[in-house]
Amino acid sequence: MSFPVHDWQFWAVTVVFLAAVLWVGRGLLPGSAARRRRRGRRAMLTLGGKAIDKK
């Protein structure tokens, strides 16, 4: 049995599958943007609207 490479549906499903693999695998790559985005930002502590000095 051979792949139906002359069928447009075969190529459509192949493209969708590869896009799904890339979307799932993007978080596994070291230094990826998805991993950096998860860290968030540090919060600034305030008391009465004024920043508190860290010691």
Image (cartoon, grey):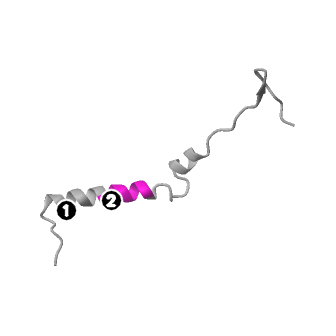
Indicate left or right for 20 with 32 as reference.
left
Indicate left or right for 25 with 54 as reference.
left
Mark 1, residue position: 10
Residues in magenta? Answer: 17-24
User: Residue 11: which quarter of the image?
Assistant: bottom left
Of the 4 image quadrants, the one containing the C terminus is: top right
Query: What's the residue at 12%, 64% (across, down)?
Result: 6
Given the current orientation, which residue lies at the most extreme left position? 6
Mark 2, residue position: 18
Query: What's the residue at 51%, 48% (across, down)?
Result: 33
Indicate left or right for 36 with 5 as reference.
right
- Expressed as whole percent of the image width and height from the top left, the position of residue 47 reads 79, 25
Given the current orientation, which residue lies at the most extreme top position? 49
Mark earlier in primary sequence (1, 2): 1
- Expressed as whole percent of the image width and height from the top left, the position of residue 30 reads 55, 57
Query: What's the residue at 51%, 58% (across, down)?
Result: 29
Look at label 1 and name its amino acid.
Answer: Phe
Element type where label 2 sits in the image: helix
User: Residue 13: which quarter of the image?
Assistant: bottom left
Our reading of the magenta stretch's main secondary structure is helix
- Circle 1: is it few (<14), some (14-19), or many (20+) Cα within 10 Å? few
- Circle 2: is it few (<14), some (14-19), or many (20+) Cα within 10 Å? few
Element type where label 1 sits in the image: helix
Asked if labels 2 and 1 touch by Cβ distance under 8 angstroms, the answer is no
Given the current orientation, which residue lies at the most extreme front position? 48
Given the current orientation, which residue lies at the most extreme bottom position? 1
- Expressed as whole percent of the image width and height from the top left, the position of residue 50 reads 78, 22
Look at label 2 and name its amino acid.
Answer: Leu
- Expressed as whole percent of the image width and height from the top left, the position of residue 34 reads 51, 49
Q: Report the Cα–Cα distance between label 1 and label 2.
A: 12 Å
Q: Is residue 1 magenta?
A: no
Of the 4 image quadrants, the one containing the N terminus is: bottom left
